[in-house]
Image (cartoon, rainbow, N blue to C red):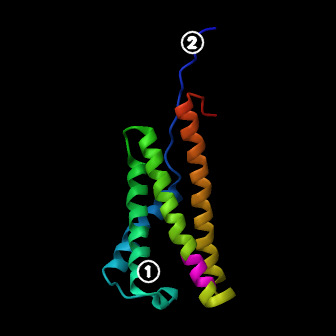
């Protein structure tokens, strides 16, 4: 038996919608933290500490996610950072989705549906990252 063939990893750019949504999370979270005018939505019904926690998580998810998208170093670190950012974002969006449906019922179909889909998309990407990391650390080839 010969030596195993080397692993070749071709890394493309992150999908533009993912990077844009992560990037917009930064000013949205920062605006909420710095007391920008509160939206007339479910956020107005939340206790202040919940809004601060939600905004902080949103902003951190964006910062770490954008940093992972432009990272030029170790690919495993970039993938783990992206995974963390997307998990954090999924938690934020799932919490918001639950809150709007609890407070507004089916009248929240648009914002709740959009945020819920964003949370699910984050979780799907997290599963993809886990598969990529397993293959990279096991020395298997990426398809």
Predominant secondary structure, magenta span: helix
Residue 53, position in %: x, y? 41, 75
Residue 72, position in %: x, y? 37, 41
Residue 35, position in %: x, y? 32, 84
Q: Specify the farthest residue to the left.
A: 34
- In this view, 34 is above or below 135: below
- In this view, 21 is above or below 46: above
Which residue is pictured at 46% across the width and 90% down the height? 44
In space, the residues marked 1 and 2 are separated at their CA atoms by 55 Å
Q: Specify the farthest residue to the right.
A: 106
- In this view, 57 is above or below 52: above
Q: Nearer the viewer, residue 39 or 101?
A: 101
Highlighted range, magenta: 96-101
Q: Is residue 94 magenta?
A: no
Which residue is pictured at 58% across the width and 53% down the height? 125
- For marks 1 and 2, give the one nearer the viewer: 1
The kind of secondary structure element at disc 2 is loop
- In this view, 78 is above or below 20: above
Mark 1 / mark 2, whichever is N-terminal: 2
Q: Is residue 100 magenta?
A: yes
- Disc 2: which residue: 3
Q: Crowdedness of circle 1 by 10 Å Cα count: few (<14), some, many (20+)?
A: few
Placement of the N terminus among the 4 image quadrants: top right
In which quarter of the view is residue 96 placed?
Answer: bottom right
Placement of the C terminus among the 4 image quadrants: top right
The kind of secondary structure element at disc 1 is helix
Q: Is residue 95 left or right of residue 24?
A: right
- Disc 1: which residue: 50
Which residue is pictured at 48% across the width and 45% down the height? 79
């Amino acid at each position: 038996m010969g030596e195993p063939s080397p692993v070749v990893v071709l890394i493309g750019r992150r999908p533009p919608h993912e990077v844009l949504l992560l990037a917009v999370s930064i000013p949205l979270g920062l605006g909420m933290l710095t007391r920008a005018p509160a939206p007339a939505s479910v956020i107005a019904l939340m206790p202040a500490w919940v809004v601060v926690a939600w905004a902080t998580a949103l902003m951190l998810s964006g910062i770490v996610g954008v940093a992972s998208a432009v990272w030029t170093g170790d690919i495993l670190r970039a993938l783990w950072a992206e995974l963390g950012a997307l998990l954090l974002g999924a938690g934020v969006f799932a919490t918001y989705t639950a809150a709007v449906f609890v407070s507004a019922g089916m009248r929240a179909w648009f914002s709740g549906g959009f945020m819920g889909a964003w949370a699910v998309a984050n979780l799907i990407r997290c599963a993809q990252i886990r598969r990529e990391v397993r293959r990279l650390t096991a020395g298997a080839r990426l398809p």
